[in-house]
Amino acid sequence: MDISEAQTYFQQATVVDHYARAVSRVGLWKSEELIFKRLFQPEQSILELGCGAGRIGIGMWELGYQRVLATDYCKEMVAEARRINQALEYGVPVQQADATNLQFEDGEFDGAIFGFNGLMQIPGRDNRFQAMQEINRVLKPGSWFVFTGHDRNRHGRKSFWKEERKLWMKGQQNPMIQDFGDLYYENDDGYWMFIHAADSKEVTADLEEAGFRVDVSALRSEICLEPPEVRDFSDDTRFWVVQKV
């Protein structure tokens, strides 16, 4: 599976609408706000990747962060994020970008965000590592990068992955996926979605090789209790707070 194929999920009108409704109904997660305020100053330039319909960029604008550049691989999401931004009369710039091949200068940004498990929706460990390298390249030394991703070893998921490993050992895994930890499944709306549930050691190794130092790795539930709107929108996920060395 290549990146463009995995992104077909986000091109569907009902999926775009789901993300659009989250801008006002969900907004910034409490955990996101706590972390972003600790790491980033309002005057800093922040690159957001996988912005969807603009939930994070718009939320940060409302907190006073007016140098956030929101980007997404999917042109449909970019169009919706621009529409919402214009309707609100905000000034968040939104553009299409491929996280594995960023068209920005070295050291251009003071920080980066890849929210709502977006990094792990890039198929292929090599591609995810390429994205980490690209993000590192466009950040200034000492800058922070924050992203989230599902942890396949967290409590409550071990039995599922135990059974999945048995399928891999028998060669009976889903032929559409390439790595253990990949999921390609049909959601409630009938659309097929890809995501990789990572092992923390795997992510740490790739981050360090890409030039980052891991500062914090914690489940969202360990950071704070989110309101029902957030928990309905997304199940528990792991936050990674890393710094360019």
Image: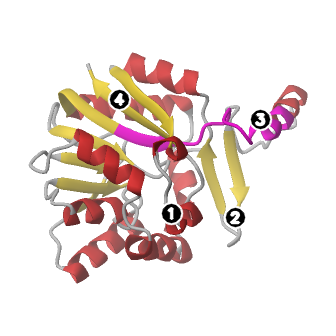
Disc 1: which residue: 230
Describe residue 113's horizontal placement relative to residue 235 as left or right: left
Describe residue 74's horizontal placement relative to residue 202 as left or right: left
User: Looking at the image, which residue is at 41% across and 69% down?
Assistant: 76
**Residues at discs 1 and 2 in contact (Cβ within 8 Å):** no
Mark before the other along the chain sequence, 3 or 4:
3
Viewer-nearest of discs 4 and 2: 4
Q: Label 3 sits on what residue type?
A: Lys
Disc 4: which residue: 242
Q: Label 2 sits on what residue type?
A: Asn
Q: Label 4: few (<14), some or many (≥20) within 10 Å?
A: many
Viewer-nearest of discs 1 and 2: 1
Q: Which residues are magenta?
A: 146-163
Residue 49 in sight in this render: no
Disc 3: which residue: 158
Question: 182 or 225, which is in the foreground?
Answer: 225
Mark 1–mark 2 Cα distance, whole angstroms, equals: 19 Å
Q: Is residue 45 above or below residue 73?
A: above
Mark before the other along the chain sequence, 4 or 2:
2
Can you give x and y, in whole percent of width and height, for residue 201 in the image? Answer: 56, 21
